[in-house]
Amino acid sequence: MAFMSHREIKLLATELYTHSITGLQWIGSDAWITDHSLTDSEGHKILVGSLGFTSPKAKISGLEEYLKQLYPSQFPDSQFVREFWEEVFNCSLNRTVNTQKQPCSGHESLQNIESQFTDVSELRFTDNVYKSVYAVAHALDMLIKCDNDQLSFSNGSCIDPKQIKPWQVLQYLNTVNFTTKEGERVYFNKNGDTPARYELVNLQFTIRGTMEGRTIGIFDASLPERNQFVMNNIPVVWGNGLTEEVPVSVCSEMCLPGTHKVLQKGKPVCCYDCIPCPEGEISNVTSIHCAKCPPEYWSNKQDACIPKEVEFLAYDEILGLVLVLFSLLGVFLTMVTTLVFYCHRETPVVRANNSELSFLLLFSLTLCFLCSLTFIGRPTKLSCMLRHTAFGITFVLCISCVLGKTIVVLMAFRATLPGTNVMKWFGPLQQRLTVLVFTFIQVLICILWLTINPPFPFRNLLLYKDRIILECDTGTAVGFCAVLGYIGFLAISCFAIAFLARKLPDNFNEAKFITFSMLIFCAVWITFIPAYISSPGKFIVAVEIFAILASSFGLLFCIFIPKCYIILFRPEQNTKKHIMG
């Protein structure tokens, strides 16, 4: 940017040209951007493509004719006119001075003379003088005529034209508002300024090889804001001599949304690298720092924070659909087994070992398969409480029935020994009470759990950065552990009793199948604990459902499939004689 006169820019251009410093985009002041003498300097070529704002080019009607009709006799005391006349016509107006030049007549004509004095093609600053004189003339006219009553002076009367003061002219000058013959409106704002009017000039080579300024744009502050700056349809020549490749004024391009500036070491502050924002951060403006999104929002890798995706085990995804199908399959097989047992309820295989407990066990297994469905879907306050309590109560009911059947097997064997009469102490009523008491204890545990600190839906923001895991918080680990611990206690007790009765002499010893079913049950839930702890997100729920289904299928297959096999495919073995051995 060169804010200097035409003389100084010539010296600078020459020096830069000497050192071969080219390709710079110059911004010039109005003092030299339209100066025709720039072509005369040695290094003027490096100024091609310069841009600058200057006063607009104007046309003053009658000025050219007036200038060409001037004579020295009209200005006898003007030293400028005398020197100008002598230089243009190469003569001498002062006849008393000894000179080799011929004397001037004073009547020479400027009509056919081309000079800067008579050239009105580049009237820029001259137009400002022209408008200034007319502005003062209008102010004096209003002052003398006393046109503006609101500017009348202290005594309320108009002033004497012979006693005009400058400050009085200034007051009227502020109210001047007129239009020149060329149609330009002249007025002053409250700060005493006229509306800014400029032309954007671009230095370009002409066909003749000279350099001249071409107007490529206009700025007029008197127009509406959106129309103040207008570019002409003239190609711009840039500092590199090209018309297409626009030079940039910064060391680095502006960073795009989603990136931030990292200053380059040892370089100016306008030199930087654009680095993508870290995950979860955005930048919608060019800045040094990225802004973090709120906890429940994630970046779109550009300029906006969008809500995080909420993830849970849903019915419409493959994993949830598979688990639902297996759950319904378990319900279906349990119902088929129940139907088979009901149709053959009078046969020895069904009646052996308390058929009432068998039907209650099948009912509890149906509930176990169905309770796994409560773990699928969007967690709510009700579903969170239901899934854990339903799971705990149905499984205790199931294990209580298995435990009752195991005790019946052991008691039945003991009753065959001489001198024993234990079956009267563990008849059908006692078996029902056993199941009821064991289940009631679990119901009490669940009631206490739900009363003190029940499970609730929880938005886990820490597990993943880009999504929210919607899961059920157990509320208190003590309640959850109490429910699982009680189920584990009953399962181990059942396994221990069944293990003791596994070798009792009987052709159909149900204790063997109960032992195997409890072995599967315990193995599933023992492996469930580390899998539950290490599984992320919605897979925790999937592991829990898998444990419920695996243990339920284990009980169904181990206890009831052998009986169904005899009922359906070995009816000859479905006799009291064969069962008793």
Image (cartoon, rainbow, N blue to C red):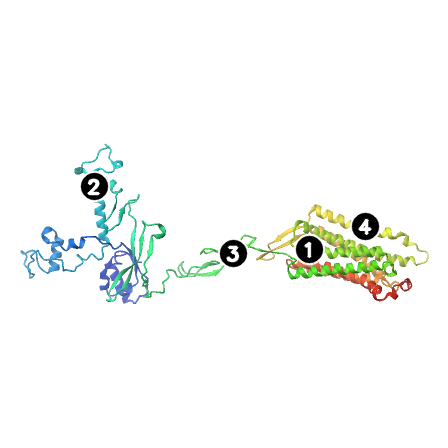
Asked whether the viewer can see residue 405, the reply is: yes
Q: Residue type at mark 1: give it.
A: Phe
Q: Which residue is mark 2?
A: 141
Q: Point out the tag, 4 or 2, that comes first from the N-terminus.
A: 2
Q: Nearer the viewer, residue 224 or 71?
A: 224
Disc 1 versus disc 3: nearer the observer: 1
Q: Secondary structure at mark 2?
A: helix
What residue is shown at x 30% (from left), y 48% (from top)? 195
Q: Residue type at mark 2: give it.
A: Asp
Q: Which mark is residue 281?
A: 3
Q: Percent x, y for residue 61?
A: 20, 52
Q: Which residue is mark 1?
A: 375
Residue 488: image quadrant is: bottom right
Q: Going by the image, does 162 lie left or right of 319?
A: left
Graded by Cα atoms within 10 Å as few (under 14), some (14 to 19) or many (20 or more), the crowding at tag 3 reads: many
Quarter placement of the C terminus: bottom right
Q: Which mark is residue 26?
A: none
Disc 4 versus disc 2: nearer the observer: 2
State whether residue 41 is above or below residue 149. below
Q: Point out the tag, 2 or 1, that comes first from the N-terminus.
A: 2
What residue is shown at x 13% (from left), y 58% (from top)? 111
Q: Which mark is residue 436?
A: 4
Graded by Cα atoms within 10 Å as few (under 14), some (14 to 19) or many (20 or more), the crowding at tag 2 reads: some
Asked whether the viewer can see residue 518, the reply is: no
Quarter placement of the N terminus: bottom left
Q: How many marks?
A: 4
Residue 324: image quadrant is: bottom right
The CA distance from mark 1 to mark 4 is 26 Å
